[in-house]
């Protein structure tokens, strides 16, 4: 948050109230608790104001303090008149040796600070590496037990295979059943699109015009062959879907295990208990994960990569 006293001194300086500027700036500097840029700005306004008031001793005191804070500080020639700039540069030349010593000390301080920051960064990186190694070591000794739900084996689209970590087999069942299901649905709509309404007029002596009109739905004779084809596709793909579904369920039941025990290994080694893993399960491979809900009722489904 900007210091209100610094802003007030700046305003007074712009209005040419130089005596007030010297007084307010000096008092605010003496109170302290200022940032570096604010202290430099107050010394600048106080020094220039004292110079304009021909108070050379006060001007030198403030401008020399400014140079000690920033030996390379320069006044803006578009704002400060040439006499003030010449006086300021004269102070710089007068104290050139002291300013050089200040610059050298600041350079050394910056180098020490940089070295300190590099040491701290190295320490943080070493600590982070140690923490990661400890985490890997902890994971390596952790045995994980994954429970499998038997109910999932009866779900379509390879859900049972995905649960067992057999991703490739699950994808085969999912794609095959999906193709058959979509084909059957498409054939159903195509078959229904062939059904048309037909208007038939019959003789009827009881009506005034001796005719009776009725509307019936059916497939025109010209499209019966096309309808037979779509009917066959519909029932054939539906039957193929259910056959594939049954095969998938049987396959999932055969490979079902109520629990799978795995252990994470440092460096991506083989699982600690390979015999407990189902065939085709690989660590890090994408797939669906399942877990039984509380009391064994229901199932939770998750996606892992």
Image: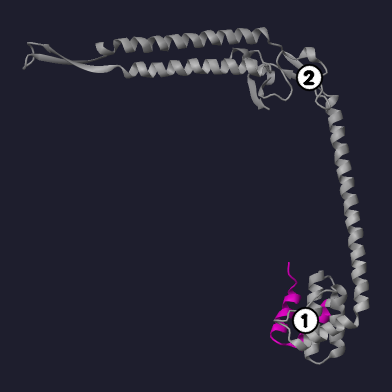
Q: Secondary structure at mark 1?
A: helix
| For the residues bearing labels 1 and 2, Cβ distance under 8 angstroms | no
Which numbered dot is residue 120?
none
Residue toward you, 187 or 99? 99
Q: Secondary structure at mark 2?
A: strand
The residue drawn where x is 81% and y is 92% is: 54
Vertically, is 7 above or below 262? below
**Residue 188 appears anywhere in the view:** yes
Judge whether residue 14 is colored magenta. Answer: yes
From what the image shows, is residue 83 above or below residue 238? below
In the rendering, at what x and y percent does residue 90 appear? 85, 85
Residue at 85% over, 90% down: 56
Q: Residue at x 56, y 8 (%)?
A: 246
- Residue 155 in the image: above or below residue 59: above
How many residues crowd mark 2 within 10 Å: few (<14), some (14–19), many (20+)? many
Number of residue marks = 2
Q: Main secondary structure of the magenta part?
A: helix
Magenta-drawn segment: 1-28
Local crowd at mark 1 within 10 Å, few (<14), some, or many (≥20)?
many
Question: Can you identify the residue that label 2 sits on?
Answer: 262
Task: Identify the residue at horizontal 82%, vertical 83% (top origin).
Answer: 88
Q: Position of residue 216 (x, y in %)?
A: 23, 14
Quadrant position of the C terminus in the picture? top right
- Occupied quadrant, residue 136: top right
Q: For the view shown, which residue lies furthest in the bottom direction?
A: 54
Place of residue 214 in the rendered image (x, y in percent of width and height, measured from the top left):
18, 15
Quadrant where the N terminus sits is bottom right
Mark yes or no: residue 297 visible.
no
- Which residue has dot 1 on it? 45
């Amino acid at each position: 948050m900007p210091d209100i006293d610094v802003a007030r001194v700046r305003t007074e300086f712009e209005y040419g109230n130089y005596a007030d500027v010297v007084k307010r700036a000096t008092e605010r500097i003496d109170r302290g608790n200022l940032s570096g840029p604010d202290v430099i700005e107050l010394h600048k306004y106080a020094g220039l104001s004292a110079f304009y008031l021909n108070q050379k001793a006060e001007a030198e005191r403030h401008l020399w303090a400014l140079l000690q804070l920033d030996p390379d500080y320069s006044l803006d020639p578009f704002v400060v008149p040439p006499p003030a700039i010449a006086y300021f540069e004269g102070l710089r030349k007068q104290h050139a040796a002291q300013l050089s010593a200040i610059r050298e000390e600041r350079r050394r301080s910056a180098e020490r600070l940089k070295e300190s920051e590099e040491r701290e960064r190295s320490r943080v990186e070493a600590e982070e590496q140690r923490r990661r190694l400890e985490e890997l070591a902890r994971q390596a000794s952790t045995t994980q037990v994954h429970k499998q739900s038997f109910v999932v084996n009866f779900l379509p689209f390879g859900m049972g295979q995905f649960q067992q970590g057999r991703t490739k087999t699950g994808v085969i069942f999912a794609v095959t059943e999906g193709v058959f299901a979509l084909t059957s649905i498409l054939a159903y709509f195509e078959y229904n699109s062939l059904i048309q309404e037909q208007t038939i007029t019959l003789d009827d002596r009881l009506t005034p015009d001796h005719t009776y009109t009725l509307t019936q739905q059916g497939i025109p004779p010209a499209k019966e062959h096309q309808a037979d084809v779509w009917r066959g596709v519909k029932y054939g793909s539906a039957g193929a879907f259910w056959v594939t579904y049954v095969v998938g369920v049987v396959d999932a039941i055969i490979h079902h295990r109520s629990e799978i025990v795995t252990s994470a290994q440092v460096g991506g080694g083989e699982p600690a208990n390979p015999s407990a893993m189902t065939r085709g399960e690989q660590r890090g491979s994408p797939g669906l994960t399942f877990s039984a809900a509380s009391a064994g009722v229901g199932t939770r489904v998750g996606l892992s990569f």
